[in-house]
Image (spheres, helix red, strand yellow):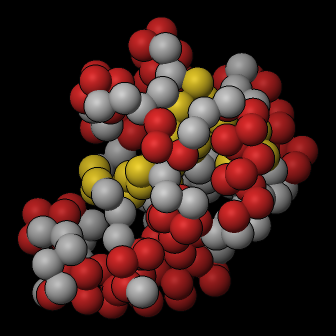
Amino acid sequence: MIDLFCPDECVGSVLDIDLDDLWERGFRALIMDLDNTLLAWETDEIPAEAREWIERARAKGFKLCIASNGRSGRVMRIARTLGVPAIPKAIKPRKRPFRRALEILGTAPEATVVIGDQLFTDVLGGNRMDLYTILINPMSKEELGTTKIVRKVERRVLNRLYRKGLIDEAELELRGVDR
C-alpha cells in the first residue's frame, strides 16, 4: 500500500527533469501539475524558465497537458498562455483527471509521466493509473493551509518510504526531510 505514495523519481524542479532520458525510455507525454510545479502557488506569473522548459519538451516531441486542482478560470487562462490543454478542478488523486489527460494526449499509461510537487495528489494519482511519477520540490512555501498540514504527513510518508528502501537518502535529503 505504501508503494502507491512512492515516486519513480525525485528531482528539485521541472528544470532538473532529463527530457532526453525520458524520451529515450519511450515516454511521449507529460501530465503536469500547475501550482508550485510550473509556477508559484496562486500566481499567474509564469517564470521564463518554466516557459522555456515547456518549449524544450514540446520541441522534443512530448505531448503536454496540465492537470490541476486549481480554479477553472485561472488554470485555463494560464494553460492558454502556455498553449497547453488543461484539466482544472481535477480533484487529484482521483483517477478521472488522469484518464481524461490520457484521452487528451492520446497516449498509453506506460508512455506517460506525471510531474508534481505533492505525494497525496500527483504521485498517488499517477501511481493509481500506473503512470511514471516524478516528484519535484514545491516552488514556493506559499500554499493552502490544508496543504501545509499535509506536507507534515508527507514528510512522515517519505521517511517510511526511505526506511523500506523505496527511495534513497539523496531523494529524502532533496526533499528536505530529516531521517
Query: Could you tell me residue 32's position as x and y percent?
Result: 57, 43
Q: Residue at x 53, y 75 (%)?
A: 120
**Residue 56 falls in image quadrant:** top left
Residue 151 appears in the figure: yes
Query: Could you tell me residue 103's position as x and y percent?
Result: 74, 38
Query: Could you tell me residue 93's position as x and y percent?
Result: 64, 69
The reply, left or right, for residue 88 in relation to residue 14 is: right
**Residue 89 falls in image quadrant:** bottom right
The reply, left or right, for residue 165 in relation to residue 97 is: left
Say which of 11 and 27 sits in front: 27
The reply, left or right, for residue 167 in relation to residue 26 is: left
- Residue lying farthest to the right in this orientation: 73
Q: Work out which quarter of the rendered image holds the N terminus and state it.
A: bottom left
**Residue 102 falls in image quadrant:** top right
Query: Could you tell me residue 164's position as x and y percent?
Result: 18, 85
Q: Work out which quarter of the rendered image holds the C terminus and state it.
A: bottom left
Q: Residue at x 31, y 57 (%)?
A: 8
